[in-house]
Every structure is written in structure tokens, then in C-alpha cells.
Amino acid sequence: MKIAGMARIATWALLIALGTRLDQAQAQTQVVPPGSPTIESINAEYEKAVHQLDRQRLESLGRLALSQPRAQAAITYDAYFRLAIAKSLYADALPYATRVIQSEDPQASISWLAHLVQIVAEADKGDYEGSLRSLASAIRMKAADPNKAATKPGGLSIGTQASIVDAYYQRLIHGDQIEVARKAMKLVADSAEAPPIRDLAGRRLKQLGLVGKPAPTIAGTDIDGKPFQLADTKGEVVLVVFWATWCLPNAQQMPMLDYINNTYKTKGLRVVGINLDAAQDGSQDPKTLLPMIHRYLLDYNVTWPTLLNSPGDHDYAAAFGVTEIPASVLIGRDGTVKHLDLVGRKLEKAIAEALAQKP
């Protein structure tokens, strides 16, 4: 979810958040028999059914392409790979992507789409080095083709191209593949024809450059007026969480973060939040947002300190290279950045390992 353009989604996200809180409040006053349906269970069941239908549609398109003459199959494969990208069904589409890439004379634009799917799918499978080789191969293919127009990303919009690059990047980061991510983003930055894609890869490289280096400064007062300085936490492990009240994925992370905080705070972990609500409107005084932020923290039982992101010395997001949220940075006992954007059990494992290290 990008910081740029936050205003476009702030309204609907806030409505969703308010609706969720109302549901939670009503649930607290009602006795629900065990096993009864809930809003969450109904939504989860629906999403599961939709996902299964998308997979079935993808498989039907793939079988149709196999039965068609080359010209018609190219049209079907185009729809097939675009569906895989739109629905993030990269791993499901890998067999057909491999078939297209290995075919003797694939249409250039279809081959390019197949390469894009293959790259992310291999990362999904945990074959990170293989995905990097596939990326390099795709770039060489495009550079070697005399008809450059045919090998451009299948008429994909800049937004879709960016989403693919970011999907790949996120898989590498969540897999803690920092070196592979550096190499991949360097390849993209050096080869991309569209300036926005080069810029995206460049921003990712900047953030990756933090790993292994001393963490940028965080110094200010939290929303309760208490001073906080990252420098004072040396010898502890610090998890910096960038969040906003309107970001639904942040809300979904809160139970896990609360568990991590409660489990590891007595062992040397500090969690600090950086709130980015004001980033949706640069002209807005962050202090005017305090009542809403306080309410959110109470609703989600957040007990760790939270600082407001603001221009100048307090633009912590810029210092840490954060351009999208959710985002997090894990800082070791020695004050250096150890990991970026890990989630779930991988985050918990990284925290445990960092706590086990001596200052």
C-alpha cells in the first residue's frame, strides 16, 4: 500500500476500520454460541471460494490454450498470464509459463509475460537463486530481440509492471533473501525502460542498503509526550513498525505484534511505532490527528511508544527508505539494521535470533 496517493484510499479504509470496530463492539455485548458463523468466518469462507474459482478459471484457460492453433493460443495465453498476475496465482501458472518459455517459437509478448510469471513463481517456491537466473534470462531475451516493441511487457500498464516488481521484491524480503533482492533490484534498475520502474527499483535498493549499517536516528517525543531516542536502546533489539490508522493490513498485523511484544519484551525487545497518518496530506498538522491515533491504539491495545512521522528531522519514513506500508525494520543489539519487513513466524524467529546475540 503506497504512501503516495494515500488520500485516494483513506476514506474507504477508514470506513472499513470503523465498521470493523463497530462489529467488534457489538460482538462484545452479544453471546455467540460456539460454532456459530461470524462475520470473519463468513468472509474467510467467501474469499476461499473466490480463490478456488480463480484457480479453476486459470486451469480452464490453460487447457483451452493447449487445444488451440498458435494464433488463437497466444490470445488465450495472454488472458491466462494476465489473470495469474492480477490474482497473484504465480505458482499455479508456473507449469504453463515453463511450457511457453520452452516452446520453439513463442510470440514475444506472451513469452515475456511467461517470464514474469516464472520469476515470481520460483520465488514463491523458495527457489530464490533460480528466480534471479530467470530474471537475468528474461532481461537478456528482451535485449537480444530486434523488435523491442514486441518484448515490452505485453502492453502491461506501468502500475501492473510495478506491482509485479514489488511482488517479487516482497517475496525475496519475506524470505530474508537480502543479497538476492539487491541483485534483482539492480538488474531491474539497470534494464527497465520506464522511469517509474527504474525509480521503484532504486528506492528498493536504497532501503536494502540499510541492512548491516547503523540504523538511522529516531529521536523525539511519543504521542503521550514522553521522550524516545533510538540511541538509548543500544544493547536491546528494536522492532520499528511503520503504520497508519487507515491501513487495513496494519490492523491485521496488530494481534501478532501484540503477541511478539508481550512474549519478548522481558527478554530485551523494544517495539516502537512510527505513525504515518499525516503522510496522506502533507499540509495537515500531525498533532490534529492525535485523538484518532489515540483511539486506534486503545482499540488494538497497543502499549509500545508511537512517534508521529513529520517533515524534517522527524521524517523517519524517509530516513528508513519506507515508501509503502506495512513496513518494519528489525535492529540488533549493536544498533545495526538486521532485517526488513519480515512477517509472522519468520519475524518471530529473527527476533529470537537477534536476542540470542551478544551486544
Image: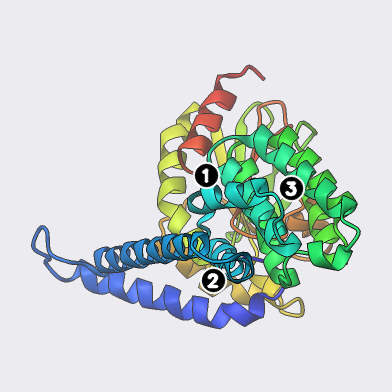
The residue to which callout 1 is attached is 343
Q: Amino acid at mark 3?
A: Ile
Indicate the quadrant containing the C terminus: top left, top right, bottom left or bottom right. Answer: top right
User: Residue 241 in the image: x percent, y percent?
Assistant: 60, 50
Crowding at mark 2 (Cα within 10 Å: few <14, some 14-19, many 20+): many
User: Residue 250 in the image: x percent, y percent?
Assistant: 51, 59
Indicate which label's residue lies in the foreground, 2 or 1: 1
User: Does 235 sit above or below residue 191?
Assistant: above
Q: Amino acid at mark 2?
A: Trp
338 left or right of 190? left
Give the SS element for disc 1. Answer: loop
User: Residue 269 in the image: x percent, y percent?
Assistant: 54, 34
Contact, CB < 8 Å: mark 3 with mark 1?
A: no
Crowding at mark 1 (Cα within 10 Å: few <14, some 14-19, many 20+): some
Camera-side residue of 55 and 108: 108
Q: CA distance from mark 3 to mark 1?
A: 22 Å
Q: Residue 246 bears which disc, if any? A: 2
Q: CA distance from mark 3 to mark 2?
A: 23 Å
User: Residue 277 in the image: x percent, y percent?
Assistant: 63, 70
Q: Which residue is at a point 76% across and 31% down the rendered structure image? A: 212
User: What number of labels is visible?
Assistant: 3
Give the SS element for disc 2. Answer: loop
Camera-side residue of 336 and 183: 183
User: Does 4 sit above or below residue 136?
Assistant: below
Q: Is residue 138 visible?
A: yes
Q: Which residue is at a point 45% across and 60% down the rendered structure image? A: 63
Q: Which residue is at a point 69% across and 49% down the rendered structure image? A: 104
Q: Amino acid at mark 1?
A: Val
Q: Which residue is at a point 46% across and 61% down the rendered structure image? A: 251
